[in-house]
Every structure is written in structure tokens, then in C-alpha cells.
Amino acid sequence: MTGPESEESPVRRAVCPGSFDPITNGHLDIIARASRLYDEVYVAVMINKSKKGLFEIEERIDLIRTVTAEYGNVRVEAFHGLLVDFCKQRDIPAIVKGLRAVSDFDYELQMAQMNNGLSGVETLFVPTNPTYSFLSSSLVKAVAAWGGDFAHLVPPEVLTALTERLRED
Ligand code: ADP
């Protein structure tokens, strides 16, 4: 047979990058949506040596693995350095990012253009589920630290881990 039908379709891969300190329902919503659009989705957890997070990288990875296990096609890895190198090494042509508000746009646009200029990798923006448009890891940590209710903002495993971590501090 000739024509496009005869060609084996390549595996479609994408990456969702971030700090995930810790993963929130906003992150999870983007990862879940990406997992329906792509064959394989990598969650790349950024190692930032100059900024110590509340959770160690391995703890963040464990939490993400637990809460994304049901999707089956999500892989979680740490990365440091350039995201485009992470993409090149794994043959990933697309970065998927959530856009929460106009305030996200300027910086995200710059990064997308820089990454495309560096390596040709594309960035696809997914509009945030309005339920989570105000949500960030730092805001969740702030609410939690002051004893506010954040159970509806994170997966149950994160609720437990964050409550325990703040009790230890
Ligand atoms: P944050 O502290 O803002 O949560 P991250 O670096 O962990 O920072 O976020 C990584 C990426 O995850 C963001 O660039 C964005 O694409 C996506 N993201 C984060 N929070 C949300 C949200 N509430 N809704 C949709 N996407 C989000």
C-alpha cells in the first residue's frame, strides 16, 4: 500500500514542565488534558539549585507519579539545564503549558519564542480550567501555612503531604 496510511505513525510526545512544589489541581488538569492529546507525556520537574523548595525533587516526583498513575502514558523526570535539551534527548517536539491569565502571557510568549528559536520545539498553550485560574503552588503553600482550607486545590495525597510538612516546620 502507498500513501500516508502505509506509514507507521510516530509516537507523539509532549512535555509539561514546571517546579511542581507541590503539584496542584491546576497542574494536574493540564497534564490530564495533554495525556489525552499525546501518546506520551513527560512531566519535567525543574531542578533549581538556587531556590530550595518546600519539597525535595524526589518527593515532588513521587507525588506526581502517584497522582498521574491512572493516566498510564505519563512519565515523570527531573531536569536541569535547558528544557530544549531535555526535549531533544527524548525526541519531544512539543511543550504544553497552561495559561492562567493575561499576566502569564508575556513571559510565556518570550519563553516559547526563545525555545522555538533555539531548537524548533513548539509550545502549545492550553487555557486553564477557570476553576483553577487563580491557582499556583506558592498560593497553596501560603494558604496552607496560615491554616486556610486548601483541600479542593490539590489532590488528596498532596493535602496529606503538605499538611505533614508544615507540621514538621
Ligand atoms: P506555579 O508555582 O505557578 O504553580 P510551576 O512552575 O510549577 O509554577 O508551573 C508550571 C506550569 O504549570 C506553568 O507554567 C503553567 O503552564 C502550569 N500551571 C501552573 N498552575 C496552573 C493552573 N492553575 N492552571 C493551569 N496551568 C497551570
Image (spheres, rainbow, N blue to C red):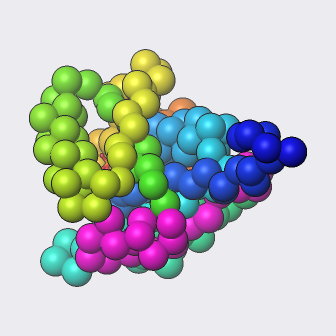
Q: Identify the residue at image location x=71%, y=40%.
A: 4
Q: Is 135 situated above or below 118? A: above
Magenta-drawn segment = 70-91
Q: What is the x, y in percent for residue 84?
A: 32, 65
Q: Nearer the viewer, residue 71 or 142?
A: 71
User: Which quarter of the rendered image does ligand 1 occupy?
Assistant: top left
Asked whether, in this view, residue 71 is left or right of residue 92, the answer is: right
Which residue appears at 75% of the width and 54% of the height? 8
Residue 131 is left or right of residue 137, and the answer is right
- What is the x, y in percent for residue 74? 64, 57
Q: Nearer the viewer, residue 82 or 18?
A: 82
Residue at image location 56% in from the left, 67% down from the top: 76
Percent x, y for residue 20?
41, 57
State whether residue 110 appears in this view.
yes
Question: Residue 166 placed where, x, y %?
Answer: 40, 63
Above or below, comparing residue 136 to residue 167 in the picture: above
